[in-house]
């Protein structure tokens, strides 16, 4: 085992603080990654505050990891020392179920092993990216293309794939009207990716505060959801609505914005239940769906797509001592558009 510096929440109520954790030795198929940057996802906050239920402490969050390979196990064939790589929300899965075999490891029927707040195959807790390094099986590591710098690539490992996968699945592209609800970490990548796929993109944000940014990121239209007129004007408009909001919403109101056969795809994971009238789905053969991150192969495909279209995240680079402040700002929807920790400051 190696002792490594990390930032951890010691309890659900405590601010994150510098501590040390133990990383396992590099196994036959493992790579050791020197972490350069780690994004702060709203899921880190939900979990560190036990908003989704009981969690494992101490918790080292972070599942948007970008770094450099510094050591490989003897059986590793995909990566070499010096490679630029990323790790997202999963570090392993059962590898045997239909979903794992189909490249849908995120839907592993035995549950993927999450990058943190989980227990690894060795029986030890997993610790995420707010740390100096991480040891991961090569099959759960992806390559960051040369065209993307590591700091703006880090958020793609969760925010990028979580928006790319459903946009792809629901055929966002030319002739399709896509609405992205919430212009935060996920939402801003959703806008960039939907635009690059050729769709007509509308942002539905709480206010018009970030309108200039939304249009610059690739949106064609921008509306405030605090204005009831938005829901009258846009009734029956969209083929796809991608909801990235971290809090419960009035789903009935958003479903009314779908055209016939349109789909509302929910990726936000609020801490409280939401109420939906089935009659809101029933009209116009609508679909209410959901999506979770993406598989390993699809994550690589997303990174290659983002490199080709130069779609890095818009980031605010912070030192590790600013994590608690960043958590407060994300919770207050005051993020433009992803905080990324410079791991050299850990
Ligand atoms: P974020 O950066 O905080 O963005 C969320 C955005 O939602 C905010 O910027 C804000 O946008 C809007 N919002 C926040 N509170 C709201 C409220 N009360 N009412 C209406 N709008 C509100 O968060 P994120 O990192 O993008 O994550 C978003 C959600 O997705 C979280 O719940 C996270 O856990 C979840 N998530 C899911 C997956 C998955 O696989 N499905 C993966 C990653 C994250 P405006 O200011 O523009 O309104
Ligand atoms: Zn995430
Ligand atoms: Zn599986």
Image: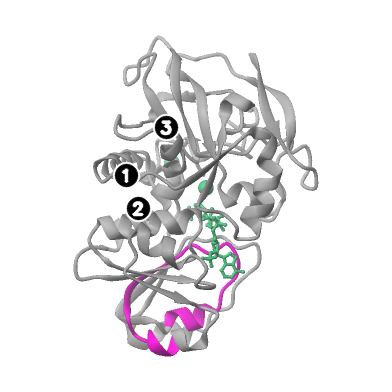
Q: Which residue is mark 1?
A: 302
Query: SS class of the residue under badge 3?
Result: helix
Q: Is residue 148 above or below residue 24?
A: below
Choose the circle earlier in sequence order: 1 or 2: 2
Determine the residue positioned at 50% across, 41% down.
89
Mark 1 Cα-neighbour bin, 10 Å: few <14, some 14–19, many ≥20:
many
Callout 2–callout 3 Cβ contact below 8 Å: no
Q: Position of residue 229 (x, y in %)?
A: 47, 89
Q: Which residue is mark 2?
A: 164
Span of residues in magenta: 231-255
Determine the residue positioned at 71% across, 34% down.
8
Choose the circle earlier in sequence order: 2 or 3: 3
- Whether residue 182 is visible to the viewer of this picture, yes or no, is yes
Residue 250 is one of the magenta-drawn residues:
yes
Ligand 1, what quadrant? bottom right
Which residue is the extreme one toward the left?
Answer: 174
Q: Gap between marks 2 and 3, in whole Å?
A: 19 Å
């Amino acid at each position: 085992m190696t002792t490594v510096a990390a930032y951890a929440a010691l309890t659900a109520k405590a601010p994150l603080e510098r501590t040390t954790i133990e990383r396992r030795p590099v196994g036959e198929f493992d790579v050791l990654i020197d972490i350069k940057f780690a994004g702060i996802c709203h899921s880190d906050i939900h979990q560190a505050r036990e908003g989704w239920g009981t969690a494992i402490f101490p918790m080292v969050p972070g599942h948007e990891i970008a770094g450099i390979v510094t050591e490989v196990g003897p059986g590793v064939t995909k990566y070499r020392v010096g490679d630029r790589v990323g790790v997202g929300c999963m570090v392993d899965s059962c590898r045997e179920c239909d979903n794992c075999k189909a490249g849908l490891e995120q839907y592993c029927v035995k549950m993927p092993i999450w990058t943190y707040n989980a227990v690894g195959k060795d029986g030890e807790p997993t610790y995420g990216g707010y740390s100096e390094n991480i040891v991961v099986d090569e099959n759960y590591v992806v390559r960051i293309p040369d065209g993307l710098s590591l700091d703006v690539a880090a958020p793609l490992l969760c925010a990028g794939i979580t928006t790319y996968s459903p946009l792809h699945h629901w055929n966002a592209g030319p002739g399709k009207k896509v609405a992205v609800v919430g212009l935060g970490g996920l939402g801003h990548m959703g806008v960039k990716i939907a635009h690059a796929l050729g769709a007509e993109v509308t942002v539905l944000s709480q206010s018009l505060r970030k309108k200039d940014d939304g249009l610059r990121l690739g949106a064609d239209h921008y509306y405030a959801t605090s204005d009831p007129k938005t829901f009258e004007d846009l009734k029956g408009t969209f083929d796809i609505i991608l909801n990235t909001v971290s809090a419960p919403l009035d789903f009935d109101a958003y479903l009314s914005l779908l055209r016939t056969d349109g789909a509302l795809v929910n990726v936000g994971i609020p801490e409280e239940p939401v109420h939906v009238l089935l009659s809101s789905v029933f009209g116009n053969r609508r679909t209410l769906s959901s999506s979770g991150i993406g598989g390993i192969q699809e994550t690589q495909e997303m990174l290659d797509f983002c490199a080709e279209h130069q779609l890095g995240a818009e980031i605010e680079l912070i030192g590790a001592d600013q994590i608690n402040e960043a958590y407060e700002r994300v919770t207050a929807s005051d993020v433009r558009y992803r905080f990324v920790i410079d791991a050299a400051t850990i």
